[in-house]
Image: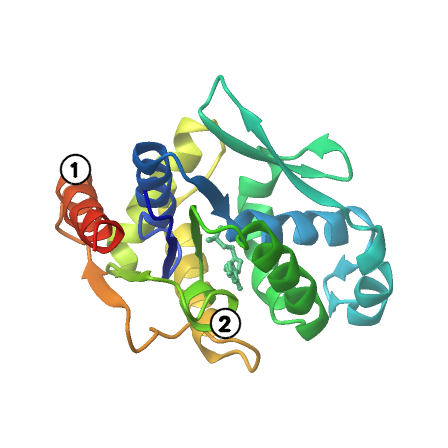
Amino acid sequence: MKKITIAIDGFSSTGKSTLAKQLAKELEYIYVDTGAMYRAVTLYAMENGMVTEKGIDKEALIAALDDIELKFVFNPNVGFAEMYLNGKNVEKQIRSLEVSRNVSPISEVREVRSKLVALQQEMGKEKGIVMDGRDIGTVVFPDAELKVFMTASPEKRAVRRYKELLDRGEDVNYEDILENVQKRDYIDSHREVSPLTKAKDAIEFDNSDLGLVQQFERIYEHALRIINN
Ligand code: DC
């Protein structure tokens, strides 16, 4: 069967990763969460004193980029690949609100993006991949056969994120999360390098009111049509 590249982009907490994981499972494709890679670099910067109240130490981060090794390792117990930073499983830490607060300025750094985009292109060179992020259909794989752009209202997304963090036992409040969602939307779509934009040939999905099953079925059918063509 023909293998394709599936690019899923959109704002934070629009259900990109849920959809991408399901598609990858059903098609037996590799799934790559590129947000996890930006989050892991952010964690590295936080752990190494490069994030202070005054902002990020961009020069130190750029100088340290070669020391940051990122790897996805499949965990059969959860059914997806987890993020490893310099050999350590950081899957839980990278999802904290603290990392979410610092990730946008880190992902604005041109050199960080170049490193991660090159890694992502390497992972997808054999196709048979579902990748989610902000610039997959525009920068990483502009030739992807299927591009999906997901949106949902900031309030709906903040509720989803709030529930996720609560389930993980974090002490969070809804207003903080809504503020973080809105701030990240702004930075992600206004940054100079690879801002979040919908690729011209992407299918747009507003899933504010669409159930997850419905959403998956529509996009899966679409993928099968392309694969069988
Ligand atoms: O998808 P996420 O919320 O886990 O992503 C975390 C941050 O990483 C997000 O605020 C923007 C950044 N990001 C990016 O700039 N480019 C990507 N391809 C993926 C994520």
Residue type at mark 1 is Val
Q: CA distance from mark 1 to mark 2?
A: 29 Å
Q: Position of residue 113 (x, y in %)?
A: 64, 67
Q: Position of residue 171 (x, y in %)?
A: 49, 34
Seen in the image, is 155 located left or right of residue 107?
left
Colour convention of the picture: rainbow
- What residue does disc 2 label? 139
Crowd rating for badge 2 (residues with CA inside 10 Å; few <14, some 14–19, many 20+): some
Residue 213 shows which numbered tag? Answer: 1
SS label for mark 2: helix
The quarter of the rendered structure image containing the N terminus is: top left
Q: Position of residue 17 (x, y in %)?
A: 38, 45
Seen in the image, is 106 located left or right of residue 158?
right
Q: Position of residue 90 (x, y in %)?
A: 65, 35
Residue type at mark 2 is Val
Residue 6 shows which numbered tag? Answer: none
- What's the residue at 21%, 47% (across, down)? 224
Instruction: Identify the residue at the far top of this view.
Output: 77
